[in-house]
Amino acid sequence: MKSLKDIINNFQNSYDDLLKNQNLKKLKQGCYLYELEADTTITSEYILLMHFLGKIEIKLQEKMVKYILSKQNQEGGWPLFYDGETDLSASVKAYYALKLAGLDKNSREMIKAKKNILLNGGVEKVNVFTRITLALYGQITWSSIPFMPIEIMLFPNWFPFNIYKISYWSRTVLVPLLIIMRRKPIAQNPNRVFIKELFKNPKNHSGKIKLISKKNFLSRIFIYLDKLAIFIFSFFTKGFKDKCENFALKWILKRLNGLDGLGGIFPAMVNALISLTILDKKKYLQEIKIAQKAIDKLIVEKKDYAYCQPCFSPVWDSGWMGIVNIENGILDDRLAEWFLKKEIKIKGDWSHKNSEVDKGGWAFQFNNDHYPDVDDTALVGMFLDRYNRIKKKKSIELAIERTRKWIVEMQSKNGGWGAFDIDNVYYSLNSIPFADHGALLDPPTADVSARCLSFLKQLNNPRDKNCIERATNYLLSEQEKDGSWFGRWGTNYIYGTWSVLSALNLVEFGNKKAVFDKAINYLKSNQRNDGGWGEDGRSYYKDFENLSKQSTPSQTAWAIMGLLAAGQINSLEVEKGLKYLTNKDNKFREDHYTAVGFPKVFYLKYHGYAEYFPLLAISKVKNQLKKNSIYPTYGT
């Protein structure tokens, strides 16, 4: 115990400086915002969008080229996360973006990239979304893309597929895409740049390439059904197709979300912009301008390079910084008021499944009212509750009660929570050819469910007893054989294990010691020699679980907080982890991506993670040392 106090005391000045530095990330409106970085795909797609529209910002493009080239790996390709293996689709988009931007195809970087792309199968092996991009540029035919008819917009609820049976992110991307796939536009491409050299068989250029089937029976069946659907839907009249397209258009316009963009995410915003442009550029001129501005706001422009973010994360960043501040005795009135202003006041798409539930929740972004985020909502609820235990404001008390009711009603049948929808578990849909990324759905996950359980136990309302029991049973059923829990939104098992232990610490159940012992053993056994913890993006692949290349500040903080939740504050592992975090060589930055949008497909680097999670872990250790109990009081 004395050793922990000494470590913290010796680091106190640096800790205070780091905490104070977070104010640089605080906006005038009262919230926090850090950069959110994905792989080069988003930036490549921004360049591709400029050339599709024929409106090219040369200086910005030059900076984006520098960014993309800086991420090229030794093999010549582009990975999905730091120090990862080459991803073919990301590499094809990067190559095309660079060539569009004027990079000579005979340059060293481009030759290296071309060789790597061809070695990995060439254009013929790219994923569905890359195929769509290439079809927009006339590099392959639209028949190379899985069939998704505009009639989908009017598929009834009972039908095996409709837009409300897929996740919010899939829905907002797909609806405008249905218009694009019907209209089949071709990019302006003013410089007439093509990538014939990336085809294994040059004869496939501008032609049809075969659909790729996953290695399972259901996927093969859907490939045949894709061909059948093309035949069947050819009999629908143009008038009916126009009706469906008009329905899709109204759907988009209702959710266009002003300067925050459709769904608040880059891919959906781009598809919305393209669909409006090809439908009627004059009629929707104002909407097109707003959609373009929403996309442009995502750009991070530095002195020497620029990249495009996938979205903004102010609610998530602010929720965690709010908890950090509370742990440090800081009651942030402006932040609390900002959260009250951002509480969602309408019913979103989630209500399609449960129309009787009242409105509520918070989005992940600044504004995204149709899509409140369950995880963010539980986090904000925990912050507001702790804040209001001291401030006792009626407006906040009412907001917390609305949040409690909304979280309870968003629980899925299996006891868990998805990120945006209820019971989004139509797993067979992940086998359709269009879903080759395997991220079409939003099923309940351990990490989101743990945050919801933490929030409900923090309030401990007697009316939620059954809900809490169901959530506990769900989390217990999700524990892996090695004692860990899967991390859907953070990398990976370290994140999931911390999240669940934080929640289960607050609950009593029969075999708690055995469950915790397994989890404790998992965390301790994965500590690295330097005292930290790390987990690679490849850990989402079979046989690479728990792969660790380097310790990171964020993952070390999660592991420490997981051990704290399990009553292990006196363990040697916590001491070693704390020494790692407080080491003078730790700059509270990390190159590794420690979060995910979609495992195996889309990885994220939250620039705030390396700062506010260590701040939280250290403050929790410090505060726990002042208490009589070895167990934390709160689940964050």
Image (tube, rainbow, N blue to C red):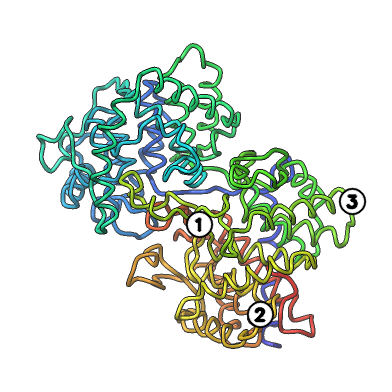
Residue at which label 2 appears: 7
Disc on the earlier residue, 1 or 2: 2
- Of the residues tagged 1 and 3, which is closer to the observer? 1
Q: Secondary structure at mark 1?
A: loop
Q: Amino acid at mark 2?
A: Ile
Residue at which label 3 appears: 394
Q: Amino acid at mark 1?
A: Pro
Location of residue 365 (image quadrant): top right
Q: Is residue 48 above or below residue 161?
A: above
Residue at which label 1 appears: 443
Counting other residues with Cα less than 10 Å from the Cα at mark 2, is it few (<14), some (14-19), or many (20 or more)? some
Q: Can residue 82 be seen? A: yes
Q: Position of residue 517 (x, y in %)?
A: 56, 87
Location of residue 410 (image quadrant): bottom right
Counting other residues with Cα less than 10 Å from the Cα at mark 3, is it few (<14), some (14-19), or many (20 or more)? few
Question: Between marks 1 and 3, how big is the CA–CA gap?
Answer: 35 Å
Disc on the earlier residue, 1 or 3: 3
Quadrant, the C terminus: bottom right
